[in-house]
Image: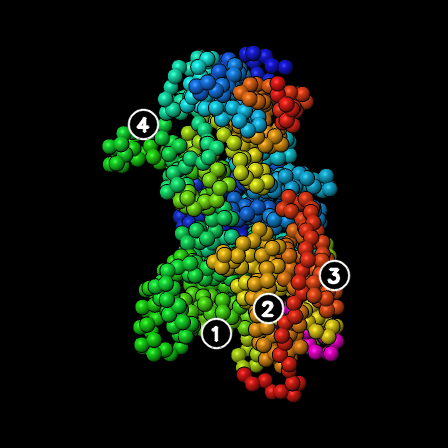
Amino acid sequence: MAQTLTGAEGLRSIPALLHRNATKFGSKPAYREKEFGIWQTWTWEETAQEIEDLALGLLNLGVNEGDFIAVIGRNRPKLYWSIVAAQRVGAIPVPLYQDANAEEMAYVLGHCGARFVIAGDQEQVDKVIEIQDQLQQFEHMIYLDPRGLRKYDHTHLHQYSHVQDQGRAARDEFGAELARRSEKPDYDSTCVMLYTSGTTGKPKGVVLSNRNVIESARASSEFDGLSREEETLAYLPMAWVGDFIFSIGQAFWCGFCVNCPESPDTMMTDLREIGPTYYFAPPRVFETQLTNVMIRMEDAGAFKRKMFDHYMAHARKVGPAILDGKPVSAADRLKYRIGDLLVYGPLKNTLGFSRVRVGYTAGEAIGPEIFDFYRSLGINLKQLYGQTEATVFITAQPDGEVRSDTVGVPSPGVELKIADSGEVFYRSPGVFVEYYKNPESTADTKDAEGWVATGDAGFIEESTGHLRIIDRAKDVGKMASGALFAPKFVENKLKFYPNILEAVVFGAGRDTCTAFINIDLSAVGNWAERNNIAYASYQELAGHPHVLETIQSHVEEVNKSVAEDEMLSGCQVHRFVVLHKELDADDGELTRTRKVRRRIIEEKFADIIAALYDGSPRISTVTEVTYEDGRKGSIKATLEVRDAKVVSVVPQKVAAK
Amino acid sequence: MLDASEGYTTADGRKIGGVVMEMKNITLRFGGVKAITDISFDIREGEIRAIIGPNGAGKSSMLNVMSGFYVPQEGEVWFRGKPRPQMKPYEVARQGIARTFQNIALFEGMSVLDNVMTGRLTHMRTGMFSQALWKGRAEAEETANREIAEKIIDFLEIQAIRKTPVARLPYGLKKRVELARALAAEPKLLLLDEPMAGMNVEEKEDMSRFILDVNDEFGTTIALIEHDMGVVMDLSDRVVVMDYGKKIGDGTPDEVRNNQEVIDAYLGVEHD
């Protein structure tokens, strides 16, 4: 342990791991990307070469040690190499969310004072050019895809391949300097800086050291027995800590292959072609896939549908038990085998999950039905709980102890404690160094002994030692009656219905709870199509009486289930509206990782909330919307406010489960 | 502003070369109906040239004359400095002219990729027999052609529908596939017949961007027909305006916009 904590075999940085991989198993594939319809492969040796050329090119452009280099774009090998090349020249890579608008980008680039930007394509280049006057330190931009950029002024703009060419040409001049800088970083040097998406306030730059990243990658790889043979698909935002750990941390530690999709639209096809063995997705992706499967099954012929329903029912009965290695009768096993041949196998193949050995979901709670669906197919889907400040891992579910309502046991090396307020605290080798240029927030979050506040309220189940998360600590409140109010608890139950994409529950300090609901356009749209219901817009569909009827029945079912919880039975939804627009990150209503921003929603839709509580049957409202290109517009709507049946709860009643 | 032999430079700094195609006093009749009356104009290397006009002005007839599908009763089409003899459509294609159609003309049952590959047909030299055997030159040829097709698929961002049968695609995407097939022929001159017809605003914006990118990236000379004035004025370097088979204006978008005859044609003044 003592040895690994200072970096085993001198592997104290990502460039050091790269060197090991390139020398020990240089001919193994490291990165793949589908381009022009073919998977192009780079071995570890080639990867090391590409990174070296780029690093030399960066030196040639005048990168100093300690400079910040922003990396913006979709998942592409060249951008991952940019991150490592930045580390090799002693600079600090800062991956940014590619769908951030110019204003958000200006804040982050200004905050870290990036001198260099490496951007994927014209769209990203345009954004940076738009804001470059606000950036004092910004000097050079490198781009990957030259399309549409030919006519741009190239005094501060460089094509990626040209930078590499110049780097290669300048090897004699800069080779020694590069070697010196690559040797220099120790275990406490900064590895990367990642900006948190920030449900409140401005994004914060989380500084992670080599120790944080490598220790987390090592511990988590050992936890799941990850090897050099894994295949992963990199499609989640590069600015998100999870992608950094999976596609760089663990990939470099284990030496496995990272596959990049051809374009964001081809992700599902690419997933199927690669068949990853180690897969990560937020619940939303699993939900979407399940919704698509269900929609396609509804359109399938009667025979297929019957077969699907029959064997899925069997899978739900015994599938999870078989996966957990629990005893199952021989007859059931045989039937499951047949089901695997006829239904589960082909379905997994279509979904791209045939080879998944370890699958994780995190970020949000996942619906038990969705979770069980995948597990019953024999896909080892597990939950983990983490955050940027912990370099991802706080808790994770070990094989054989998987449940949809917990987030698992503390990851190796992590200590947990629950404060009196119910807030979860942790301490681990992955605990971040600091928030960049923000000592107050650092002190607020991390105490002198290294304990970090998660901001989430939860408790540890005594019988199993698993952690259960209730809600964001600051969102957990009291209702006027003094009853506990945990909006996320109810919202998650609502969101588990395929027809509901997003829900926001209000009720802190009030007598009753109410809710905003967003319909899921693909699920509800398909339902409308099958029932010959014509609609011209999202707004019209969302306001359709039949749709409201369906949503109302979902809300009432949720109320029934909420009423069963002793602590939270007061959180039943009394009134709700189906919103006329989708909550959107461009409008500031969600974060870039699609978490609800309550304060902003409360302010923006104050008139609708008022209508929810004053008993009016409908509300006319005008909402400002931001289009993808940044233009603003507004939409008018009259929304129906509906009352939902609630279950009356006798306070003394003992919950019978 | 225009020199007969030299080119000119556009407002955004592109160099426009010499004349590629010249229409000389074209008159086209169907029986007693005069579709086109004595029209002359030229198209220069690297430019985006638009032909606009109200419905029934003779725009599509003009495009069909340019593509060699119609043979005018009077006048000549000059292509690359020579008068063009009467030709079969495939001979026109071999000369480096590709087109798209107002009413999409794709092979509905075939995948997007196969449709784009048909655009490579004029570049294939191996015979049916060797292609069926899939040996030697035929294989190498298909690989090379596939590479070009894939680059165009990448360029037009239709990777996600590569294997999808065309019949299953929405209208806007079909239009894009048609453009892809035309581009696969690596044309010197690309004729677009109402590329934006029937599209919504977003699809129009996408298509406009692709047209500009094609011109910029491959240096393809583009002649397009459109009746959406707004789109044309933003896209093109020079515009020919037609009305009732006659040319009533020719020049840069600004010149055309201020031309009284053009304004009359669009706002509807009584003809005498």
Q: Residues within 10 Å of mark 2 (few under 14, many from 20)?
A: many
The picture quadrant where one finds residue A175 is top right
Mark 4 against mark 1, which lies toward the viewer? 4
Q: Is residue A569 above or below residue A88?
A: below
Q: Magenta residues?
A: A478-489
Identify residue type, mark 2: Gln
Identify residue type, mark 4: Arg
A507 or B244, nearer to the observer? B244
Task: Please give the label number shown on residue A606.
Answer: 3
Q: CA distance from mark 2 to mark 1?
A: 35 Å
Q: Residue at the location (73% across, 78% down)?
A: A482
Q: Residue at the location (51% across, 70% down)?
A: A368
**Chain name for mark 2:** A
Q: Position of residue A370 (x, y in %)?
A: 49, 67
The reply to the same-chain question for discs 4 and 1 is no
Residue pointed to by mark 4: B125
Q: Residue at the location (55% across, 77% down)?
A: A465
Task: Please give the label number shown on residue A401.
Answer: 1
Report whether A197 appears left or right of B111. right
Of marks 2 and 3, which one's residue comes earlier in the chain?
A: 2
Q: CA distance from mark 3 to mark 4?
A: 70 Å
Residue pointed to by mark 2: A552
Of marks 2 and 1, which one's residue comes earlier in the chain?
A: 1
Q: Is residue B73 above or below residue B111?
A: above
The answer to whether residue A430 is visible is no
SS type, badge 4: loop
Q: Look at the image and tell me in which quarter the C terminus of chain A lies.
A: bottom right
Coloring applied to the structure: rainbow
